[in-house]
Image (spheres, rainbow, N blue to C red):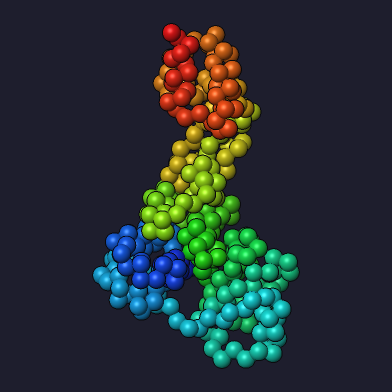
Amino acid sequence: MDERKIEIIDRTIIVLREIFGDKLKEKSAQVRELIKLLYIIGSDYIEITQELYEELSPLPQDVKFIISNNNKIEIESVNVLCEVLNNKLNIYNKSNARIVGIDDIIFYDYHKIFLEIIKFFGNNIELSIKNNYKSATAMSLEWVKAGGKKVVTTFAGIGGFAPLQEILGGSSFLEKIKDHSNYRLFPKVLSIFEDITESKIKGNAPFIGKDIFNVESGIHVNGIAKDSRTFEPYDPSEIGRKRNIIIGKHSSVNALEIKLEELNIKYEHDNLTIMLEDVRKLSTQKRGGLNNDEIKRLYKKLCI
């Protein structure tokens, strides 16, 4: 595994301030905790404004901060970027600049363009690819593979930026880039983030969704029981989660056995075929999987 040689600059706090305004002051304690956790899970710098610095002081210790500056180059499209690279547009300060935008770079020879960006701006250029085409994560990782050193993110992609957790997870689990981050805190970060925003992140969101390790289909349950690597690119515990066998209308007897063992229920194998019929009926009525209490109740009914 290679050591991580990129810098991740996270601007979640700035975006939260832009969205919620003065209301964010009411949750200063949670915001400070979020700052600390964003740093622990893998951000190299937490970006804040001078105003936020004053509002949130005292800030968490042992966290590296940068104060937002105006040296941003808003570039909506690759066509505009090409004009910049061809010196058709004047860029007065190329050092420590940040390119924001270029959402459509996925439709071009992005590797070549990334190399041109580095050649024109130097290694200190920060890239903040927006997510209008749902490709900010993929393109940010390609930027790193091309030699880019600095990436701008936000947690859960709030504000339309590359999602922090996806850059971290993609670097570690897909690109095999080693770092010393603590991904097991993802659920805790998610909880605080949802508390601050008063919203819920989709259960299937990569790396942080609460349902991403839910497994129902019989063939998947059997496969995971034999070798989890068949269906899981990494162990759930690495991001602070547990695998959850969902029992529903697609479940098999074998999946039911695994679930009952997980619930520490001693069962008679002969009862399971009958129980599975009840499971499928209830699951169809609910239009979803059964919770643990419902499973216990169905098995108990068989034993009466």
| Residue pictured at 59% horizontal, 17% vertical | 277
| Residue pictured at 39% horizontal, 76% vertical | 49
Where does the C terminus fall, quadrant-wise?
top left
Q: Position of residue 216 (x, y in %)?
A: 58, 31
Residue 17 relative to residue 128: left or right: left
| Residue at the extreme left of the image, as rendered | 58
State the residue in front, 16 or 163.
Answer: 16
**298 versus 122 height, above or below:** above
| Residue pictured at 57% horizontal, 43% vertical | 233
Q: Position of residue 220 (x, y in %)?
A: 61, 31
Q: Answer yes or no: is residue 142 visible.
A: no
| Residue pictured at 47% horizontal, 30% vertical | 291
- How many marks the image carries: the answer is 0
**173 versus 254 height, above or below:** below
- The image quadrant of residue 141 is bottom right
**221 versus 208 height, above or below:** above
State the residue in front, 175 or 274.
Answer: 274
Q: Position of residue 55 (x, y in %)?
A: 30, 73
